Amino acid sequence: MISIKHLDKTYDGGEHALSDINIDIADGDVFGIIGMSGAGKSTLVRTINLLERPTSGTIEVDGRDVTALSGEELRAYRRRVAMIFQNFGLLAQKTVLDNVCFPFLAASGKVTAENRARALELLDRVGLAEKAQSYPSQLSGGQKQRVAIARALACEPEVILCDEATSALDPKSTNTILKLLRDINRETGVTLVVITHSMDVVEKICNNVAVLEHGRVVEQGSVAKVFADPQAEATRVLLGKVDWDA
């Protein structure tokens, strides 16, 4: 369980990026966080991974507040909470296999034969076993994101944060990635937190959703309920249910 309580993030100069965020994400859930550009989605996901420290509030994972972690405890936490990005985040000068092995190198300073075997298994799982010795520049966008997913799975995380993971992809590649993520969630029980501006993505993959606007949660609940009966204006805008002529 990830439990975010009264989370605030204020930058120098007084800009409030997040204000009183309260969200609970159950183990094994596929939870969407959606909002327009500037709503605070990416700031929120960076605070969950502690790439950004919140100004106040708590992030509890399995009952433990992680916001003050540092050193080895922080590194161990980040191995539990992996992340995939819009721009893939692959190392251009490394092969696909070496990219998937990178978390092992970062964790222990070396890559063992067992690690490489694990990486090859993951590449096979995402359908890219034949690309192990290729370089990122030789891959399509969808293939790059599949490599990023394999890398995220390398250390067997409990949570994967997906920050606009499909926004740079064409519709066919988007559907391929969403199906892959959904299947991995069902096979492994890994919790997925899906950051997106697309209600279509939320509808296809998520069980629950929180809607952000101006750094605040304005609505949350099951996807079925929120889609059927949106309460917040921001939600209705995202769903295209606003009568602009009214």
Image: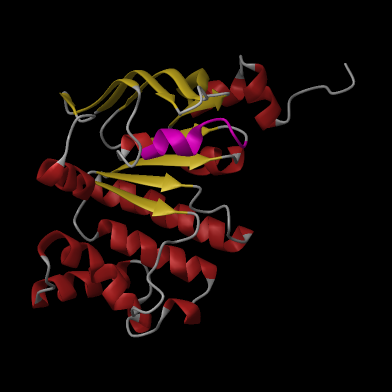
Taking the spot 22% from the left edge, 62% from the top edge, the residue there is 103
Taking the spot 45% from the left edge, 46% from the top edge, the residue there is 163
Could you say which is closer to the camera, residue 32 or residue 101? 101
Could you say which is closer to the camera, residue 19 or residue 33? 19
Judge whether 194 appears above or below 85 on screen. Answer: above
Q: How many marks?
A: 0
Give the farthest residue toward the right. Answer: 245
Q: Is residue 41 magenta?
A: yes
Any part of residue 220 in sight: yes
List x then y, in percent, for residue 242: 77, 23
List x then y, in percent, for residue 152: 30, 57
Any part of residue 31 in sight: no
Left or right: residue 62 compared with residue 14: left
Q: Which segment did they paint magenta? A: 37-46
Q: Main secondary structure of the magenta part?
A: helix
Res. 148 image quadrant: bottom left
Could you say which is closer to the camera, residue 230 or residue 102? 102
